[in-house]
Amino acid sequence: LKPCWPKLLMQQLRPACDHMIGLRGDVLLLCLVLALYAGAKEVPTEAELYSSWFSVAGLACEKRLIERPYCCMDERLMPHIERREIHRPGTEWQCEDSNCWDERVGRRGEDLLWVPEGASCTTPRILWLHGGSWYYGSPSTTGYASLASKLASAAGAVVMVPDYPLVPVGNFTGILNASISALRWLALHGPTDCGPHDRAPLFVGGDSSGGGTALSLIFKLKKEPGLMPGGMKLAGGILMSPWTNLLCNTPDYYVHAYARSEEGVRTGDVLTKTGPRKSMETYQSVAKDYLGGDEALLDDPVASPLHAGAAELAPTTPGASAAPPLHFTVGSTETILGDSVLLAQKAAAFGVEVSLNIFSGMWHDFPMYSEGCGSGHDLWPASKAIIEIAKFVRMAELGGTRLGLTRGGVASTTYVYDRSVHSVKWFAPPLSEGGEATMGVAAAALSGGLGGGGGVGVGAVGAGAPGPFVAGLASGVALSVLVLYLLWLRGHHRGSCCAYIQIKQALPSSHEVPSDVVGAVEAGLESARIPPLPAAVEVGAKWWVPPVAAASAAGGREHRLG
């Protein structure tokens, strides 16, 4: 009832009864009851309810992205971050109208290096591979200059963005080799002429298609560590909305297909509005071009990282380490959500340290819209995502490959809601969260704080001064009517309340499942003679980790109920 009362009293009850002061008491009572009934029946429209769940920045970005996908990315560069152009021998290539789809034509191949103030040879270094379906993008366009400078500022790291040859000039093999060359240069040089003995933490990251190539690079180095100078190893991988499945056949293409209700409320991925089947076919076509037409690589564990197995993820010999720690950032509405979730779960089962952050209501590559798409408000989830990446870099810098993120073969997974909307009611105070108190400091380094992003989609209904009818109406009559009305509501919903109480009483007081229950379940499954899965279901066989492998990677502990 709470949302109804201010509107009810101010808009329904007072105008209806102000003109009846002095009339008979039963008429006043009837007026009050009718006003209460009419006001209580009013509910927000679908569009109003939807808007109340999202910030001003989120709604503005959604509207603009629906009209023009991939518009309005961030442009702001962070202060105290130096921008350097790097010309490495042998990296030059030509982007012409006849062989290149990108808008930046002419001579290409220059990298950008973003260096924080006071950086040294021990400062963490991040190689960031930009997205754009391998057809588009560069270190200085489509928001990557802003993203790199923000990552450098928040993480206190040197960030290098190479200008690798785009398809069709380049392909999977050429882009991967260009990425290895850039990583080797970054490992040996850093912010100054550092030497091979200056062991700074080294990370590989990327977004979208660049995130897929970043994982290809990580797995390539896992299998061929001699590619790095002096036996250098990666400290971690940073994946932002990575495209990891080149077969493009996860259920999310359908589950998160874009749709729009009669009242204009959207659901699904705002950046993919062509329908699930068309999207899958388009993505598969792009993937084949990236692979140079070699369809055998569509499920190759290095080229298509979702299909990775023990060789790419698990320790290969006793005492060896698994793949480096991985940090995933993804929006909950993405058509390629499964590309992150499935791989994160698999990597953790094989013993990799994994953190997975899923942001509610966010779209593909949302951290690149932290400035709010021209709304004048910061997009809180985008800024939060960058801060979480910075925290991961700092953790990996201090903790090495054992960060305590994966426990029992399960990734550390967080589903993140937008704290700039309804945060007082939904969330615990910031200081109650471990490490959350430092968020304001990191946010200030990003954009002067997140205070500008706190706008709510719809304004609260205000309550004015009471009208003259309040003084003329006996308080006893008003209270009696309100009590009767609330009692009626209580009786009306009594069934659902009682059902909830019955369910709650039926639940055990502990989350631990009794051993006899487990035994009964296992016995029932053994005698149930469950038929084998049809061939159509087995398409995802390479997505999952076999239970024995999962138990082995988790130190011999197998989850029986799993």
Image: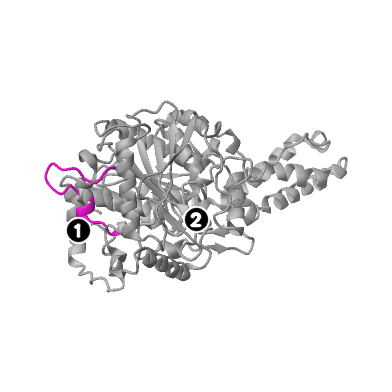
Tell me the magenta residue range.
307-327
Residue 343 horizontal/vertical position (percent)? 31, 54
Disc 1 and disc 2 in contact, CB within 8 angstroms: no
Inspect the magenta stretch and tell me whether residue 473 lies in it: no
Locate the C terminus and report the quarter of the image it occupies.
bottom left
Look at mark 2 in the image and give the residue it sits on: 106
Q: Is residue 241 left or right of residue 201?
A: right
x and y, in percent, of residue 26 in the image:
80, 46
Residue ID at (27%, 53%)? 346
The residue lying toward the viewer, choosing from 218 and 495, is 218
Residue 334 or 424: which is nearer the viewer?
Answer: 334
Q: Residue at x 51, y 62 (%)?
A: 272
Q: Nearer the viewer, residue 474 or 174?
A: 174
Report the magenta stretch's main SS: loop
Q: Position of residue 546 (x, y in %)?
A: 21, 58
Instruction: Tell me where residue 10 sits by quadrant.
Output: top right
Residue plotted at (63% across, 55% down): 47
Read off the residue under disc 1. 522
The image quadrant that residue 402 belongs to is top left
Name the kind of residue labelled 1 in the image.
Glu
Instruction: Please tell me how crowded label 2 is: few (under 14), some (14-19), or many (20+) other residues with Cα within 10 Å.
Output: few
Disc 2 marks which amino acid? Gly
